[in-house]
Amino acid sequence: MSGLLHAEKVQKMPAVRAYLQHAEATRRIVEENYTHLTKEDERLTLTVEENVLVQLENLRTHPSVAAALGRDQLKLHGWVYEFETGQVFAFDPVKSQFVPLQEITAQIVEPSSAMPPI
């Protein structure tokens, strides 16, 4: 994603440049909507997260994925792995942001008070 933000970093890497074309929508979104982010690390994190969301949208347009989603036979999840810490972040659509995966899995595995005990 750093190469997406700084094309000069991948100028001599044609395969990487070609691969990054899949993230062109992400680059445009970041450049058009997040000019207020000036810290490089914040901008990079946002770009990674935004790209996950863009790629999820791309997946939803694939006919077999769209059909499975329509039949409620498939759930898509957006995760980001932070190499430095080993932490995984999941997109929480309710909060409209990425949160530590533990927060999402805790919501899933906690039994609802409305459910009778087994």
Image (cartoon, grey):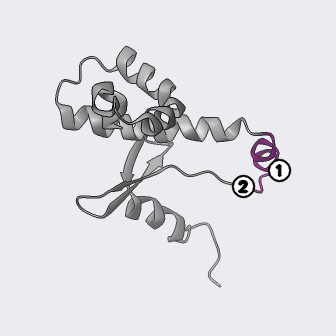
- Nearer to me, 19 or 89: 19
Residue 85 lies, with reference to residue 75, above or below; the image says below
- Nearer to me, 41 or 103: 41
Q: Position of residue 3 (x, y in %)?
A: 33, 34
- Left or right, 111 with respect to 96, comes to right
Identity, as a three-letter code, of the amino acid under mark 2: Leu
Residue at the image position 51 percent from the left and 42 percent from the top = 93
Q: Are the residues at dot 1 and dot 2 in contact (C-beta closer than 8 Å)? A: yes
Mark seen at residue 71:
1
Residue at the image position 55 percent from the left and 71 percent from the top = 111
- Left or right, 112 with respect to 16, comes to right
Inspect this view and state whether residue 96 appears: no
Q: Position of residue 86 (x, y in %)?
A: 30, 64
Secondary structure mostly taken by the magenta-highlighted segment of the chain: helix
- Write down the quadrant of residue 5 in the picture: top left
User: Could you classify mark 1 by the number of other residues whose Cα lies within 10 Å: few (under 14), some (14-19), or many (20 or more)?
Assistant: few
Identity, as a three-letter code, of the amino acid under mark 1: Arg
- Write down the quadrant of residue 1 in the picture: top left
Q: Which residue is mark 2?
A: 74
Inspect this view and state whether residue 12 appears: yes
Residue 67 inside the magenta-drawn segment: yes
Specify the quadrant that holds the C terminus: bottom right
Q: Which residues are magenta?
A: 63-73
What is the secondary structure assignment of the residue under circle 1? loop
Q: Position of residue 43 (x, y in %)?
A: 26, 31
